[in-house]
Image: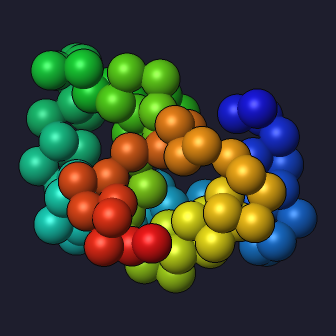
Amino acid sequence: MRYALFSTLETKFISYEHIKELYEHDLDFASKYYDCVQTAQNGYFMHNDYLFKEKRLCVPKGSIRKLLVKDAHERGINGAFWCSKDFRLAA
């Protein structure tokens, strides 16, 4: 499912690389992003410059998160692929 979601993102956007740029300034993930640059901490880790919490992609606030939430509701995806402190607010 993870790869299918990335493929979906890639077709909807020129590139999903933009997510990586958003971590630095995101209120929810900026400190975790900087903490994990060298090593995993408290369940958070970096993989290919993306921030994950356990096995879920951390998606910063913004239009990409809104699109993912909308797509998840339309497709019936349970939302377990990404994490957000304010997920309820984004929906």
Vertical arrangement, residue 72 with respect to residue 18, above or below = above
Relative depth, front residue between 26 and 74? 74
Which residue appears at 32% of the width and 52% of the height? 84
Vertical arrangement, residue 50 with respect to residue 29, above or below = above
Report the number of discs: 0
Instruction: Identify the image quadrant of residue 15.
Output: bottom right
Q: In the figure, is residue 45 to the left or right of 10?
A: left
Image quadrant in which the N terminus is located? top right
Which residue appears at 34% of the width and 30% of the height? 53
Vertical arrangement, residue 77 with respect to residue 80, above or below = below
- Residue 33 coordinates in the image, percent (x, y): 24, 44
Q: Is residue 54 visible?
A: yes
The residue most toward the right is 11
- Residue 67 coordinates in the image, percent (x, y): 62, 74
- Residue 8 coordinates in the image, percent (x, y): 83, 56
Relative depth, front residue between 43 and 75? 75
Q: Is residue 16 visible?
A: no
Relative depth, front residue between 51 and 66? 66
Q: In the figure, is residue 36 to the left or right of 90?
A: left
Image quadrant in which the C terminus is located? bottom left
Which residue appears at 17% of the width and 42% of the height? 32
Relative depth, front residue between 26 and 90? 90
Colour scheme of the rendered structure? rainbow
Vertical arrangement, residue 40 with respect to residue 37, above or below = above
Which residue appears at 47% of the width and 23% of the height? 55
- Residue 13 coordinates in the image, percent (x, y): 76, 73
The residue most toward the bottom is 63
